[in-house]
Structures are given as structure tokens and as C-alpha cells.
Amino acid sequence: MQSMEKLYNDYFQTVFKYLFCMSHDTDLSEELAQETFYQAIKSYDNFRGDCKISTWLCQIAKHLLFKEHEKRKRYDSNPIDEISDGLPAKENVESLILVNESKVELYQKLQSLDEKTREVMYLRLTGELSFREIGEILKKNETWARVTFYRGKQKLVKEG
């Protein structure tokens, strides 16, 4: 097997992009990507080799993300001060709203798609992953990822 440093260098961006697609949180994605490699090093002896390394790493990442979401659900309490500290200055609010309005509409429309199609769309649009990488992550082939993305796009245009 490759050295752990090479493994990290070769697959960090893939794992990070996958996590970002799922969480839409840069800091969380980076933290969990690092944790993914830590867990991979700890459990490397258990890697059976029946899938690609990138798929194995993304499965570890997905498990860690779900675990983190569960933890946050249990302990999440945001006082109003914490929420208001994160708000942009008043003069930037209008421009942010205009810029993000179409993104919000797109993400709302994506929610109407089935889970697999939505996941392909997120990975392609926000993670900027190739169809080959998407197919590997979802344990399908590149053609399936292309067709699923195309059909999802057509459905969104049709609902329009």
C-alpha cells in the first residue's frame, strides 16, 4: 500500500469535496477530512481492498459526518447573540441576498428530487467532482452518474 503521506496527498481533496457537498460547511469539512485520514490510519489493517481507496475513505467520511450531525442535534443550542454575531454588515445584506437568491431557489428545487439524484447534483455542483469520482463514491459507474445528473437537470428545468 502507498505511504500514508501519499494517501493523504492523493485523496484529501476528494474527501474534502465530498464532505463539503454533504455539509456545505468549509470548516467542518476540513476538520472531518482530517479525522477521516486519522481513522483510516487506525483501521487500515481492516481495509479489505474490495473497493477503491477513495470509496473507502468517503465511506469513513460519510460515517463521521453523520456522527457529527447526530452529536450537533443533541447539543445544538444557539443563543441570539451567537446568531447575530455571524450576520454581515447592514450594507452587505442586500447584495448578499441578491447574489444568493438564485442559489436558494436552486437548492429548494433540488429538495424535490429523489435522494440519489440530489446527491449526484450536490456532488457535481458544489463539490465539482467528475462523473467518474461521483460514480466511485456512490458505488455506481460513470455513465450512471452522467445520466442521473442529466435527468435531474431536465427535471429541474421542466419544473422550472
Image: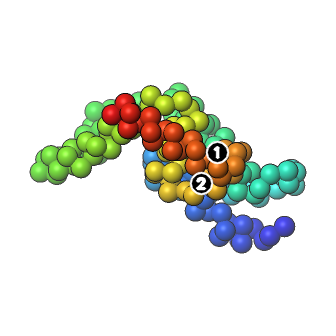
Residue tagged 1: 144
Any part of residue 71 in sight: no
N-terminal of the pair, mark 1 or mark 2, is: 2
What residue is rendered at 53% in x and 44% in y?
149
Residue tagged 2: 131
Comparing 78 with 24, the one in front is 24
Residue 26: x and y in percent read 46, 53
Q: Which residue type does callout 2 highlight?
A: Phe
Is disc 2 placed on a helix, strand or loop? helix
How many neighbours does mark 1 have within 10 angstroms: few (below 14), some (14-19), or many (20 or more)? Answer: some
Residue 67: x and y in percent read 62, 37
Residue 40: x and y in percent read 75, 55
Is disc 1 placed on a helix, strand or loop? helix
User: Looking at this rendering, what residue extends furthest in the left direction?
Assistant: 91
What residue is rendered at 71% in x and 72% in y?
6
Q: Name the front one of labels 1 and 2.
A: 1
Question: Does residue 103 lie above or below 34 as drawn?
Answer: above
How many neighbours does mark 2 have within 10 angstroms: few (below 14), some (14-19), or many (20 or more)? Answer: many
What residue is rendered at 62% in x and 62% in y?
12
Question: Does residue 19 lie above or below 113 as drawn?
Answer: below
